[in-house]
Image (spheres, rainbow, N blue to C red):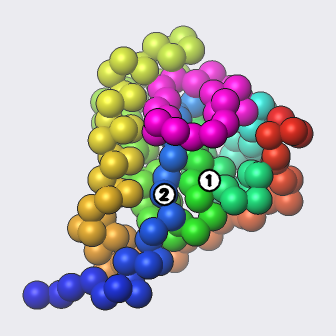
Amino acid sequence: MLRLTDEDLKMAHGQILYALVARETNVLAEHQTPGVPFDLPTATRLVLQRIPMEDKRHTYEFDQEYLFVCLVSEGICYLCLCQKSAELRRVFGYLEDIKKQFMQRFAAEAYAAHTLALNASFAPILEQRLDYFNTDPEAMFQVLFRRIPTVQYDVSPPCFTPATI
């Protein structure tokens, strides 16, 4: 049986704190963990205005300790806020996971839904998958050891701070 070492677990100690799914600037569903010291719904609406909607992965520094990490695919943006110490393969694994779950459930509605129209249905999934990727060693195992192509993403120059948003 393969076991994760302490070093593997240290790589994964950074937490994902917030997640959303949006079509351009129209947030369809979101979840924020308790105790996050920012007004993230307001901040993310402003960040969404600056994200190019081409199919790509992006990271944006936020307040020196955090990253906004996003995956844009087919006009839908999957975005999360994580601590800088979070392992990006795990964070992008989370975004790929919620992309798959979202499109399986809402592919037909995603392009016409109004703001937060899918929140009641999808926010619990964002929360459940966020908890899984933050706490379950199996999530780290899957990200570390499954065969997936190398992830390329832009580390975009804009640095967002609560004061600039």
Image point (39%, 29%), residue name: 123
**Where residue 52 sits in the image (x, y, percent)?**
75, 43
Viewer-proximal residue, 35 or 23? 35
Image point (66%, 50%), residue name: 68
Task: Quadrant for residue 163, please give it.
Answer: top right
| Amino acid on which disc 1 is placed | Val
**Where residue 54 sits in the image (x, y, percent)?**
69, 46
Q: Is residue 30 above or below residue 95?
A: above
For residue 34: magenta? yes
- As helix, strand or loop, the secondary structure at mark 2 comes to loop
| Amino acid on which disc 2 is placed | Gln
Indicate which label's residue lies in the foreground, 2 or 1: 2
Q: Which residue is mark 2?
A: 15
Q: Which residues are magenta?
A: 24-45
Task: Quadrant for residue 61, please give it.
Answer: bottom right
Q: For the residue carrying disc 2, how many other residues have a C-alpha within 10 Å: few (<14), some (14-19), or many (20+)?
A: many
Q: Give the left or right position of residue 82, taking residue 4 as reference.
A: right
Residue 24 in sight from this viewpoint = no
Q: Which residue is mark 1?
A: 69
Q: For the residue carrying disc 1, how many other residues have a C-alpha within 10 Å: few (<14), some (14-19), or many (20+)?
A: many
- As helix, strand or loop, the secondary structure at mark 1 comes to strand
**Where residue 99 sits in the image (x, y, percent)?**
43, 44
Q: Is residue 127 above or below residue 56?
A: above
